[in-house]
């Protein structure tokens, strides 16, 4: 990004890449960090932007960076943690949201990943050690990932944590619609689910839905691009499927006019 004239202060949103969902019976991916600065001072010059890609199945996302380390204006939005595979806990994030834990069968659900300054933790996988064997939801910028059951119905199936819509200058072509006005980003991925059950919703802001059997397509499990949301966990059938891909991050800069 090239700043030719001194804009004074700008408002900026920087979101890290979301984590990928876990494989079969896995947790949802955590959202990347959602970082806002409404009074960032910029001087004329070049400000490189690195947009962090979302993580692939069971992999963390990547950091999104505005500016250079030598520039006082540099902002880094850390990645979201990956959803845990069946025997694994969700991955933590140093600044964003943690991934949901795997279902952990037969010993019980694995813990969700811890979160950083700009995120929320992932939920734990199924605690009962019996069907429906659901993982935990990935954390979102606006709320923690839901743990899985009991009673294994409704919101107790590892829903992804809700994202956030608090950035006032997001263009209508960015983010996703949500439960209230504004453009939403950085939702957690829904958990992978048990045979014959329903897909588990991802969090508002673009979180991928957790797969159920018959398996939903990989595209459904993947998060919305350029939202920093987590990918959905994979279902159990027909075997170890890939979790959804996390959403790539985004940088939005609002420069005052006049």
Image (cartoon, rainbow, N blue to C red):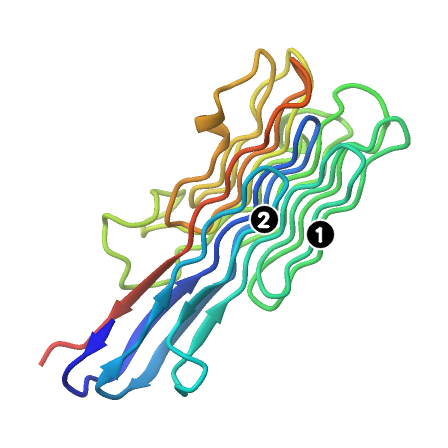
Q: Is residue 109 left or right of residue 56?
A: right
First in residue order: circle 1 vs circle 2 = 2
Q: Residues within 10 Å of mark 2 (few under 14, many from 20)?
A: many
Question: As displayed, is residue 54 above or below residue 79?
Answer: above
Q: Residue at x 59, y 43 (%)?
A: 29
Instruction: Give the quarter of the figure containing the N terminus.
Output: bottom left
Residue most toward the left?
Answer: 258
Residue 157, how many percent across, how many down?
67, 30
In which quarter of the view is residue 214 placed?
top right
- Residue tagged 2: 30
The residue positioned 65% from the left and 53% from the top of the image is 98
Name the spot of residue 203 as percent of width and height, x first. Answer: 51, 41
Question: What residue occupies the far right of the structure in this picture?
Answer: 107
Q: Is residue 3 left or right of residue 148?
A: left
Q: Quadrant of residue 200?
A: top right
Secondary structure type for disc 2: loop
Measuring 56% from the left and 47% from the top, which residue is drawn there? 19
Image-quadrant location for residue 89: top right
Identify the element where label 1 is drawn. loop
Question: Left or right: 101 with respect to 216?
Answer: right
Q: Quarter holding the C terminus?
A: bottom left
Disc 1 crowd rating (10 Å Cα; few below 14, some 14-19, many 20+) is many
Q: Which circle marks residue 113 in the picture?
A: 1
Residue 84: horizontal and vertical position, in percent?
A: 71, 40
For the residues bearing labels 1 and 2, Cβ distance under 8 angstroms: yes
Q: Nearer the viewer, residue 79 or 8?
A: 79
């Amino acid at each position: 990004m090239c700043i030719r004239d001194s804009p004074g202060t700008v408002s900026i949103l920087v979101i890290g890449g979301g984590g990928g969902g876990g494989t079969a019976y896995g947790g949802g991916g955590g959202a990347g960090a959602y970082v806002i600065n409404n009074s960032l001072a910029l001087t004329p010059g070049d400000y490189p932007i690195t947009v962090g890609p979302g993580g692939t199945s069971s992999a963390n996302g990547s950091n999104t960076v505005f500016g250079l380390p030598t520039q006082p204006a540099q902002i880094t939005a850390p990645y979201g943690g990956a959803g845990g595979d069946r025997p694994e806990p969700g991955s933590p994030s140093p600044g964003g949201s943690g991934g949901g834990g795997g279902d952990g069968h037969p010993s019980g659900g694995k813990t969700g990943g811890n979160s950083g300054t700009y995120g929320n933790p992932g939920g734990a996988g199924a605690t009962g050690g019996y069907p429906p064997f659901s993982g935990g939801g990935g954390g979102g910028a606006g709320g923690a990932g839901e743990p899985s059951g009991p009673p294994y119905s409704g919101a107790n199936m590892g829903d992804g944590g809700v994202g956030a819509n608090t950035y006032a200058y997001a263009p209508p072509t960015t983010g996703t619609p949500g439960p209230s006005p504004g453009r939403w980003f950085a939702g957690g991925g829904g958990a992978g689910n048990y045979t014959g059950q329903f897909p588990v919703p991802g969090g508002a802001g673009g979180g991928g839905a957790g797969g159920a059997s018959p398996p939903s397509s990989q595209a459904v499990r993947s998060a919305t691009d350029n939202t920093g949301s987590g990918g959905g966990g994979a279902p159990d059938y027909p075997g170890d499927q890939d979790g959804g891909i996390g959403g790539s991050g985004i940088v939005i800069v609002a420069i005052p006019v006049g």
